[in-house]
Image (cartoon, grey):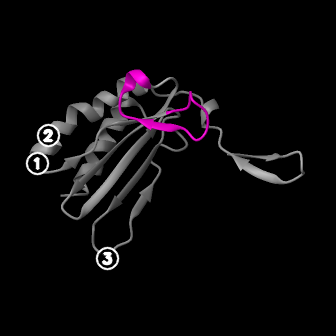
């Protein structure tokens, strides 16, 4: 995010994800989700479709589930649920993730982390992160 001054002199924050440096190939990283998803389903997880955030169509970016409709991919994500537990992992092309997990218990706060920031993840590191994320549900 950066601060810009508009014509009226007011400051506002704008997101700069369109100009984010690509450090991880999302088309390769998505295979880490795809190769695990069926196993998760067999274990009883509800697994949502992989979503792609498209920066190619302006702001706000659209989430899509079909890769071939994405002009400029900037992130991939997946949501999972097991009973009352739920969570999501979003990998950005800059190499970090937004990870959220909630146990489903009203007395527990959600866990929100940004693994890989600022140093970045490799594709293999993303795969390991998915495994540790799923282990939170067990």
Residue ID at (53%, 34%): 94
Q: Which residues are magenta?
A: 54-69
Q: Which mark is residue 39?
A: 2
Residue 102, image x, y percentages: 33, 63
Q: Residue 137 is drawn in which quadrant?
A: bottom left
What secondary structure is marked by label 1?
loop
Dot 3 or dot 2: first in sequence order is 2
Mark 2 to mark 1 CA distance (whole Å)? 6 Å
Mark 1 to mark 3 CA distance (whole Å)? 24 Å
Residue ID at (55%, 31%): 55
Q: Give yes or no for residue 33 being in the magenta stretch.
A: no
Q: Residue furthest left?
A: 42
Q: Marks 3 and 2: CB-CB under 8 Å?
A: no
Q: Which mark is residue 31?
A: none
What secondary structure is marked by label 3?
loop
Is the C terminus in the top left, top right, bottom left or bottom right quadrant? bottom left
Residue 2, image x, y percentages: 73, 45
Q: Give yes or no for residue 63 being in the magenta stretch.
A: yes
Residue ID at (29%, 39%): 49
Q: Nearer the viewer, residue 108 or 10?
A: 10
Q: Marks 2 and 1: CB-CB under 8 Å?
A: yes
Q: In the rendered image, which residue does mark 3 sit on?
A: 106
What secondary structure is marked by label 2?
helix
């Amino acid at each position: 995010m950066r601060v810009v001054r508009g014509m009226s002199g007011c400051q506002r924050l704008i997101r700069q994800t369109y100009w984010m440096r690509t450090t991880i190939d999302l088309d390769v990283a998505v295979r880490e989700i795809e190769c695990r998803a069926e196993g998760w389903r067999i274990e009883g997880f509800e697994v949502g479709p992989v979503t792609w955030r498209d920066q190619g169509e302006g702001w706000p970016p659209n989430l899509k589930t079909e890769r071939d409709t994405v002009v400029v991919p900037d992130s991939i994500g997946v949501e999972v649920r097991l009973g009352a537990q739920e969570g999501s992992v979003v990998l950005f092309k800059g190499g970090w993730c937004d990870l959220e997990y909630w146990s489903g218990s009203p007395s527990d706060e959600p866990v929100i982390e940004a693994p890989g920031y600022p140093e970045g993840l490799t594709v293999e590191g993303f795969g390991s992160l998915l495994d540790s994320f799923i282990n939170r549900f067990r």
